[in-house]
């Protein structure tokens, strides 16, 4: 599993790039963890909570990539 450390804007860019991949995005599982410990499921929900500033980190799991992104 790859680990990345980025700021809020970099994390949003990573989600947007994943969303633009089209067919691959539908097969990708995205789970975010908020700063208060609650989990958020789905690409759109993680993106929404990233923009608000609630996400501490998120994981992306697809057929060819497994990564965790920590947001500062």
Image (cartoon, rainbow, N blue to C red):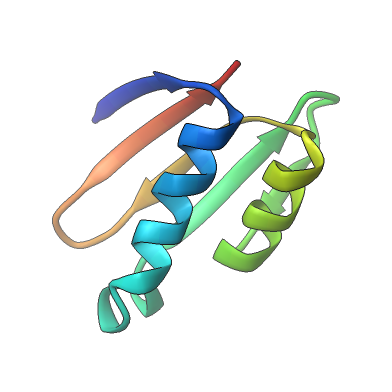
Question: In the picture, which quadrant includes the N terminus?
Answer: top left
Q: Is residue 68 rendered to the left or right of residue 55?
A: left
Name the quadrant of the C terminus.
Answer: top right
Residue 58 seen:
no
Vertical side of 15 occupied by 44: above or below: below
Q: Residue furthest front?
A: 9
Camera-nearest residue between 13 and 36: 13
Occupied quadrant, residue 34: top right
In the rendered structure, the answer to whether residue 68 lies left or right of residue 21 reads right
At 62% from the left edge and 43% from the top edge, which residue is drawn? Answer: 32
Image position, residue 52 (x, y; %) = 81, 43
Whether residue 37 is visible to the viewer of this picture, yes or no, is yes
Q: Position of residue 35 (x, y in %)?
A: 78, 24
Q: Residue at x 72, y 46 (%)?
A: 51
Q: Is residue 44 above or below residue 53?
A: below
* Residue visible at 40% across and 32% down in the picture: 68
Is 8 left, or right, of 69 in this rendering?
A: right
Q: Position of residue 67 (x, y in %)?
A: 32, 37
């Amino acid at each position: 599993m790859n680990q990345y450390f980025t700021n809020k804007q970099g994390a949003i860019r990573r989600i947007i790039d994943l969303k633009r991949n089209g067919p691959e995005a539908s097969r990708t599982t995205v789970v975010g963890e908020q700063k208060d410990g609650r989990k958020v499921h789905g690409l759109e929900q993680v993106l929404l909570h990233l923009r608000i500033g609630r996400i501490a980190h998120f994981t992306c799991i697809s057929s060819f990539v497994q990564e965790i992104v920590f947001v500062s």
